[in-house]
Image (tube, helix red, strand yellow):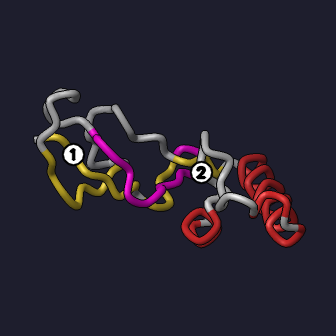
């Protein structure tokens, strides 16, 4: 899942993923269909991504790897997610790697 996000941008929310012109490429379309099926299958099995941005830092869910100063966020708030984290039926499978506001 991470490789699809990083290399193709398929899993990115909002921008539709991919480089300009790639959306018409049949290989990209096929990869997008596979990614969506795999995401749905994992969700149906109980695997959920952790959505940390804008929430208070929680060491039970997040792994802070850097601190930043950003006046738009309160202290000890997750500013950015650097690597997705996942839970399975309420248990953390992988912590979200995040940057936290000082």
Please say if the residues under marks 1 and 2 sit with CB atoms less than 8 Å apart: no
Q: Is residue 20 left or right of residue 24?
A: left
As rendered, which of 62 and 37 lies closer to the eye?
Answer: 37
Kindly identify the residue that appears in the image at 40 percent across and 41 percent down. 52
Determine if the magenta segment contains residue 60. Answer: no
Image coords of residue 6 (percent x, y): 54, 67
The residues tagged by marks 1 and 2 sit, at their Cα atoms, a distance apart of: 21 Å
Please say if 14 is above or below 62.
Answer: above
Determine if the magenta segment contains residue 81. Answer: yes
- Crowding at label 2, few (<14), some or many (≥20) Cα neighbours within 10 Å? few
User: Of marks 1 and 2, which one's residue comes earlier in the chain?
Assistant: 2
As rendered, which of 80 and 62 lies closer to the eye?
Answer: 80
Q: Which residues are magenta?
A: 78-90
Identify the element where label 2 is drawn.
loop
Identify the element where label 1 is drawn.
strand
Please say if 88 is above or below 27.
Answer: above
The prevailing secondary structure element of the residues shown in magenta is strand
Residue 100: mark: 1
Quarter of the image with the N terminus in it: bottom right
Q: Identify the residue under disc 2.
A: 12
Residue 49: mark: none
Image coords of residue 19 (percent x, y): 65, 61
- Crowding at label 1, few (<14), some or many (≥20) Cα neighbours within 10 Å? many
């Amino acid at each position: 899942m991470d490789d699809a996000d990083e290399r193709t941008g398929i899993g990115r929310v909002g921008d539709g993923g991919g480089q300009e012109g790639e959306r018409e490429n049949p290989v990209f379309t096929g990869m997008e269909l596979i990614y969506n099926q795999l995401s749905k299958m994992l969700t149906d099995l109980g695997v959920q991504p952790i959505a940390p941005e804008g929430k208070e830092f929680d060491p039970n869910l997040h792994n802070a790897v850097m601190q930043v100063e950003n006046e738009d966020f309160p202290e000890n708030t997750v500013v950015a997610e650097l690597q997705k984290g996942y839970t399975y039926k309420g248990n953390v499978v992988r912590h979200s790697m995040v940057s936290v506001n000082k």
